[in-house]
Amino acid sequence: MIRKTKEEIEIEFSKAIDQATELENLAEDLSRVARGGMESALMILKNNWRGDTGGSIELTGRRTTAEIYRTADDLLRVAKTIRTTADLVYKAEKSAIYLCN
């Protein structure tokens, strides 16, 4: 059995929370791109595209935007899972140290 010090437990917990925060930041960045950048690009394409494939390009752009939002939501779910798991492991390891001492 591996025995961890209190400091190791704190460091691992902190790393997990940092990873969750990074995923949340990435999700926000993706949502911002979908909200602003994709909408602007689609509007430019719609207004300037000549030909029969304009509707197809717009539909593909809308699908891509939806996929970006889904990916952002997935990242938020993973971040929440990391936070929940880290909290459970942290509490369990701290309790184990308390019981062993």
Image: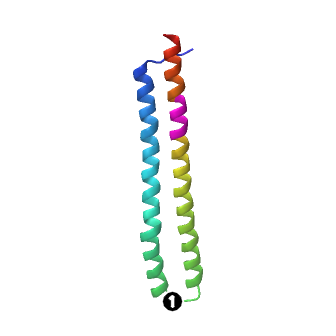
User: What x and y, as percent, mark residue 99?
Assistant: 53, 14
What are the residue bounds of the magenta stretch? 83-89
Residue at 46 percent of width and 36 percent of height: 16
Instruction: Name the quadrant containing residue 73.
Output: bottom right
Residue occupied by mark 1? 50
51 w.r.t. 94: above or below: below
Give me the residue at 51% from left, 34% from top: 86
Residue 3 visible somewhere in the drawing: no
- Residue 77 vs residue 59, the one in the foreground: 77
Q: Quadrant of residue 71?
A: bottom right
Quadrant of the rendering where the N terminus is positioned: top right
Residue at screen point 45% across, 25% down? 9
Q: Give the quadrant of residue 60.
A: bottom right
Residue at x 52% of width, y 51% of height? 75
Query: Is 63 inside the magenta-drawn segment?
Result: no
Magenta-colored segment: predominant secondary structure? helix
Residue 49 placed where, x, y %?
A: 49, 86
